Image (spheres, grey):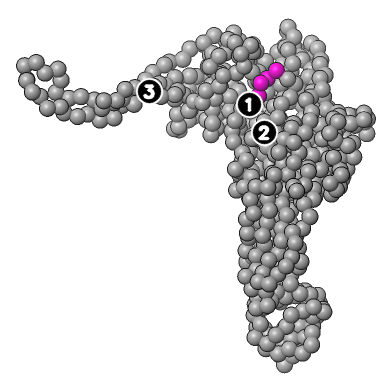
Amino acid sequence: MSVYLTQYPRKDNINGFSSLKQSKWNAAHHPIVYQLQRKDFVVNSIVDSGGYVKIICASGAELNVDDSIYLQCGPYDSAGTITAVSGLTAVLDIPFTVTAGTGFYNNFTTRPNYRITTKLYWVDSNNTYVLQQQPVFYPDPTGLVKVDVSPYVRRKCSLLNTCTYDVVSMAEPTMGGSFNMIYREDYTGSTNNFVTLNDPRRTYYVNAAKQLRDTYGSNMAVYVPFFDADTVKGKFLHPATKAVYFPGFPFSLGFVYSDDITGIDITREITFKNLNGATVSSTSDAINAGLDHSLRMNHLMLATIPAGATSADVWLQGDDSGTGGDDYFDPNFVDGYVNSRSNTDAPTNPA
Amino acid sequence: MATARLTEIKTVDIWQECVNNPVYLMWYDTLGGPCYWCFAYKQQRGLSTKEIGVFIPYIDDLETAEADTETLGMNVQPQLLVGATGLTTDQMYIIESLLSATRVLMLTNPDDWEADGCKWQRVGVATGTYKTIRTDNARHNIELTLNLPRINTQTQ
């Protein structure tokens, strides 16, 4: 296929992290866009031919007189028509200005009805990909296709509260999750296959809406926990600096159980303090882990409040020195994704 | 490394005042996180009623007729006026996220939720213009109206 995925719905090089960090977590109520670029045939160079552009193409180029094309090469960015052909070179009706190096052209005449057919998958609680929709996307005149999966992601979102408040942590399935997509280039007469369903193209979402001028825009990077020695840490999903707990009533803090912390031992740490700021007691409890918890928005409950405590400092601590926090995940899960059906980390590919 | 902190250290203030007549609400803020607040001490209950329509029955005998108009039915919306005083600016941000929430739940069994499980009921926060934070004050007050589930009535 001659279509290239040029942009993923993620933020790279998040500020404050010393190593390369990516956040693939998006707020569901904003566009979640994969950008693809149609590039039918390679142009090796452009020379002058009687004041008009002459393209010299790589082998495989489809060139016929009167073909309607789009050219992007050096400073040239326009539609045109082929006026003369000779082997792998063609003269266009675009005026020549300067010579140019490599680029591409799209041929609308030999590849009409161009579209990108996609398959969108949602990951269920058994870590299995479930096909959701097969929407078709059309490019703009320059061959750019924007695949926005957010309308389909929002269909999996709803504002339900199913927490039972009797465990350390619990996932809320309708408030966050994971999507993936595969695509195929189609035009009249094409016989392409879909690309492989693999983890680097996976995206994650929270049932959230971000605001104008928010750091990282609609990406949830500020709220994503990373297993990292850096000083900038993922925030809890809460509107105020301090939360308020009413004793005797259900309470939880929301956190993103991100792809970066699956597979390590995670504990909830609480330090209870009295009115003077002195520590009353501390507690450390393992959170509830598992396929149906991770990669979602989770509730984090508080422990029993000791007498004399007027505030509690709460955070999540990670430890990767064990054999893995969970039977379902390999400790190497954090470092890289492997596209293999035999790998128990990745969601099961559909039959 | 073997161990690292994954998240920020979130301070949770433990409410020290005694709570009676609790109205306990839960909602998700715009970031998708669960939030809670308890409006306690006193609330004002009220009813907002409206006739669906009236009809004028034919009167056979003016001397013995029971009515000259009849109501088709009633729309009854119970309301609860709740409030909180002396909130810090930071706590008011929690209340602001309540006022902005798309879906708000009220705990209907505050006395036995631990044994029977939480029984949440959806309520509506009345929309309108709210004055939340006066920037030169350290403490703020808020009053808001909750629309409780409508009362079903007979129609005729």
Which residue in the structure is indicated by mark 3?
B152
Q: Is residue A316 magenta?
A: no
Which residue in the structure is indicated by mark 2?
A173
Q: In the displayed structure, does residue A156 sit left or right of residue A102?
A: left
- What residue do we see at 11% from left, 18% from top? B65
- What residue do we see at 42% from left, 21% from top? B79
- Asked whether B20 or B53 is in front, the reply is B53
Bounds of the magenta segment: A162-166
Quadrant in which the N terminus of chain A appears:
bottom right
Q: Are marks 1 and 2 in contact (CB under 8 Å)?
A: yes
Q: Is disc 3 placed on a helix, strand or loop?
A: loop
- Give above or below for A309 relative to A106: above
Q: Are marks 1 and 3 in contact (CB under 8 Å)?
A: no
Q: Is disc 2 placed on a helix, strand or loop?
A: helix
Q: Earlier in the sequence, mark 1 or mark 2?
A: 1
Q: In the displayed structure, does residue B80 sit left or right of residue A13?
A: left
Label the magenta part by its dominant secondary structure.
loop
Amino acid type at mark 2: Pro
Q: Is residue A165 magenta?
A: yes
- What residue do we see at 71% from left, 26% from top? A170
